[in-house]
Image (cartoon, rainbow, N blue to C red):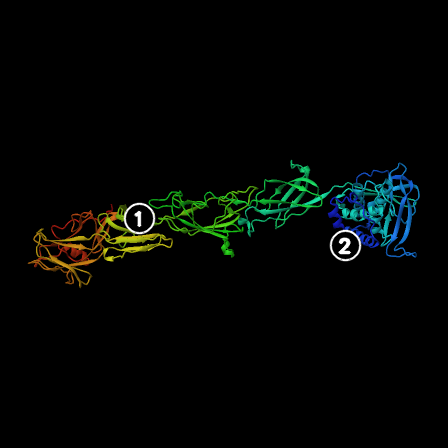
């Protein structure tokens, strides 16, 4: 290893001093010493071993260019005694004290073909014999590196040899080069030096031994760096009787290398984002600026770090362009020129632009009821806030990455404008991380997944809790991709539904008017529809008041004031207190956040008019009648006496409540009527009223009378707003004591077969029917 380092130092010093390796342009030095020769020989052998000079184990014919030789030649000596070649062992001392031993000494002749073409001995251990020889491809015996090294040594000599060396020594120097290389392949002589030109000077007065040593050292060093540039190097072996001859050559096409480095033009988007990769980009390298397929000389492919493979190319100018973009990137339209220098590596840099999606409209709000992007009533689409999260991955459609344990890389909050829209941009950004932007500074979203969820509803609308998942995928070769569809977010109006019913019955009351006072103090009149319902849509922030102001005849107003408060987050709080004595009302806030009010209107009371007459139609004054709450007549509801007109009016009686009436004091000269058992007669009275259906029925002892019964003993009168019920009690003649009871009533209450007195003014009974308007 010490000798190898010394040789490399020697070669590097020579290359530094000589520059172009033209050693013959310098003043000749004295021939090297024995020590230098030994070191040089060892260093040369190390070079040849490093290059891989050697024979082939098996022969496979390698296609080559046509050889400039006939398959059979006649070999002969072109000129005898052109110079001497010695095989010297510098490790031994001769008997005469000379510090080396010459193992072989040949007075060389120039060998060649009959037409004067020079050939070189391929095996110095065999004697030359003239005669016909057949051409054989040297690749049958030697590997490619061996043939390339000889071709490189010939090229070096032809281009850098001293002009003072005559043609004979030109031949001998090349012969030595052939043996230097092949000796390493065959090991003919071991650790010896093949010498020529000892004690001889060139025509310029330089020692040929010095030229030989410099050729050996510098030529080998140059060949080591450039042998691979002789891609068409060839060797021809002419075999026959005696020594085989050879011919060597090749074209020097100096090669350099080129590699490519690819980076992201927007690392803030692509760093640690699995949707983008530098691996797999392909760049074509072309000899011509036309970038035609035929002029392409290679392809550079990048790995995950953006580093490409290395191309070995002849020195010259090349043109590079991207032909395949890697995952997530746009195809770079830029073309670059790269110059390849012999023995040097050139690097070309490219920056690829990551694909992003510029989202003009991120989302657009629509009214869920109308399907339009226009709010209802006084509601607004302005001010809705949406939380948007970006994840650097793509999963199954509609999959929430958070449920997979993924963490959002960036989060933003956007707010809608008056049109219910918001874009991915600063105009609508309220808070959150920095926006992703493209190279032009325009906000754009990288390839990946975004989730969108409303976190604050606009005034007058309910919060839409749905989580929307959208994917942005790569498409085409351009920087901007359009793989996002504007999200339509349906908004449910924040509303109050009021249901108006008759108290105690599921009967809607249409046409009921209410006054609504909104938070800004404005008042409006609203009215129930045919189903007894009304809706307030788009409830504003603040306190609302609703009060009934008008209802159809037959009902009483519900005196409760419905009051509630809508907070900035659209949460509704009930602030009113319901008084059941003013009417029943129920207020409910639904799970979705709306408000439902169910209000019942009580029925207007009715009047009972009791008419007292005798059998001749005379009105009787002073008859006392009492109403009871139960059939046993224990709890008095009210009582009174008939006036001079024979009528007793009892007011504010409740619809639907059963009353029990009996005469508790007879007029003077009359007695209280009794049944067959001697008990005072009791009348069961009650009223059924449904003003919304124009129904009013007066029940007496289970029989119904309606407005068509206007002239009987039991009848209905008055108006829809002020209903009257009439009962006529008649005293008939023909009794020892005047009876204040009606025989018609006695017949209703007595068993069959009982004799009844028939009143002269008994009214014709009418068939009862219900009248509904």
Badge 1 local density, few (<14 within 10 Å), some, or many (20+)? Answer: many
| Residue under the point 76% across and 51% down | 10
The secondary element bearing badge 2 is classed as: helix
Q: Which mark is residue 6?
A: 2
Position of 189 with respect to 334 (left or right) is right
Q: Closer to the camera, 146 or 507? A: 146
Where is residue 748 drawn, in percent x and y? 18, 56
Q: Closer to the camera, 121 or 418? A: 121
Where is residue 387 drawn, in percent x and y? 44, 51
| Residue under the point 91% across and 51% down | 104
Q: Could you tell me which quadrant the C terminus lies in?
A: top left
The secondary element bearing badge 1 is classed as: strand
Where is residue 460 drawn, in percent x and y? 35, 48
Q: Which residue is mark 1?
A: 533
Badge 2 local density, few (<14 within 10 Å), some, or many (20+)? Answer: some
What distance separates the C-alpha of mark 1 from that of mark 2?
108 Å
Q: Earlier in the sequence, mark 1 or mark 2?
A: 2
Does residue 472 sit above or below 35 in this rendering?
Answer: above
Q: Could you tell me which quadrant the N terminus lies in?
A: bottom right
């Amino acid at each position: 290893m010490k000798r190898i380092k010394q040789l490399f130092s020697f070669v590097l010093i020579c290359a530094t001093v000589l520059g172009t390796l033209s050693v013959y342009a310098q003043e000749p030095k004295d021939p090297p010493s024995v020590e230098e020769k030994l070191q040089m020989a060892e260093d040369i052998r190390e070079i040849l071993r490093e290059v891989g000079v050697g024979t082939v184990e098996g022969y496979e014919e390698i296609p080559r260019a046509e050889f400039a030789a006939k398959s059979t030649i006649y070999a002969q000596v072109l000129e005898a005694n052109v110079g001497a070649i010695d095989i010297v062992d510098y490790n031994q001392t001769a008997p005469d004290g000379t510090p080396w031993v010459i193992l072989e000494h040949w007075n060389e002749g120039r060998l060649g073909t009959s037409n004067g073409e020079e050939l070189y001995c391929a095996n110095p251990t065999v004697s030359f014999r003239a005669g016909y020889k057949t051409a054989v491809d040297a690749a049958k015996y030697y590997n490619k590196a061996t043939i390339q090294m000889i071709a490189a040594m010939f090229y070096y000599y032809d281009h850098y040899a001293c002009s003072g060396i005559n043609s004979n020594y030109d031949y001998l120097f090349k012969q030595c080069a052939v043996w230097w290389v092949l000796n390493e392949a065959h090991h003919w002589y071991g650790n010896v030096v093949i010498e020529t030109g000892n004690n001889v000077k060139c025509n310029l007065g330089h020692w040929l031994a010095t030229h030989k040593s410099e050729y050996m050292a510098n030529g080998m060093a140059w060949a080591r760096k450039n042998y691979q540039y002789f891609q068409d190097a060839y060797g021809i072996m002419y075999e026959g009787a005696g020594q085989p001859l050879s011919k060597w050559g090749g074209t020097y096409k100096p090669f350099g290398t080129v590699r490519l480095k690819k980076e992201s033009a927007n690392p803030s988007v692509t760093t640690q984002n699995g949707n983008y990769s530098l691996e797999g980009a392909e760049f074509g390298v072309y000899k011509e600026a036309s970038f035609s397929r035929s002029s392409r000389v290679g392809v550079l492919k990048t790995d995950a770090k953006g580093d490409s493979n290395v191309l070995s190319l002849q020195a010259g100018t090349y043109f590079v362009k991207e032909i395949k973009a890697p995952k997530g990137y746009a195809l770079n339209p830029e073309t670059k020129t790269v110059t390849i220098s012999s023995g040097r590596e050139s690097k070309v840099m490219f920056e690829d632009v990551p694909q992003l999606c510029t989202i003009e409209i991120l989302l657009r709000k629509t009214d869920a009821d109308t399907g339009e992007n226009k709010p209802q009533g006084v509601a607004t689409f302005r001010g809705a806030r949406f939380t948007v999260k970006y994840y650097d991955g793509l999963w199954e459609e509609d999959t929430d990455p958070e449920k997979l344990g993924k963490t959002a890389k960036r989060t933003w909050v956007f707010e809608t404008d008056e049109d219910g829209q918001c874009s991915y941009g600063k105009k609508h950004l309220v808070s959150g991380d920095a926006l992703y932007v493209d190279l032009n500074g325009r906000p754009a979203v990288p390839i990946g997944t975004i989730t969108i969820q409303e976190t604050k509803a606009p005034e007058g609308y309910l919060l839409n809790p749905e989580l929307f998942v959208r994917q942005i995928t790569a498409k085409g070769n351009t920087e901007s991709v359009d793989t996002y569809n504007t999200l339509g977010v349906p908004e449910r109006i924040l509303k109050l539904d009021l249901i108006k019913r008759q108290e105690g019955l599921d009967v809607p009351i249409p046409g009921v008017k209410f006054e609504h006072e909104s938070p800004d103090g404005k008042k409006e009149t609203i009215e129930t529809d045919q189903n007894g319902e009304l809706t307030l849509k788009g409830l504003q922030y603040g306190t609302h008041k609703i009060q009934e102001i008008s209802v159809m005849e037959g009902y009483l107003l519900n005196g409760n004031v419905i009051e509630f408060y809508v907070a900035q987050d659209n949460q509704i709080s009930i602030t009113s207190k319901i008084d059941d004595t003013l009417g029943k009302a129920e207020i409910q806030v639904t799970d979705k956040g709306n408000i439902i009010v169910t209000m019942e209107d009580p029925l207007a009371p009715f009047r009972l008019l009791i008419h007292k007459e005798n059998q001749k139609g005379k009105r009787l004054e002073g008859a006392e009648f009492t109403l009871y709450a139960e059939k046993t007549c224990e709890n008095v509801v009210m009582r009174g006496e008939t006036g001079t007109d024979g009528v007793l009016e009892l007011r504010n009686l409740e619809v639907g409540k059963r009353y029990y009436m009996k005469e508790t004091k007879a007029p003077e000269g009359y007695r209280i009527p009794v049944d067959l058992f001697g008990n005072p007669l009791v009348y069961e009275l009650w009223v059924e009223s449904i003003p919304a259906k124009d129904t009013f029925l007066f029940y007496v002892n289970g029989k119904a009378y309606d407005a068509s019964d206007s002239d009987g003993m039991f009848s209905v009168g008055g108006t829809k707003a002020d209903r009257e019920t009439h009962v006529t009690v008649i005293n008939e003649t023909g009794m020892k004591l005047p009876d204040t009871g009606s025989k018609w009533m006695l017949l209703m209450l007595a068993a069959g077969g009982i004799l009844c007195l028939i009143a002269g003014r008994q009214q014709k009974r009418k068939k009862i029917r219900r009248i509904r308007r």
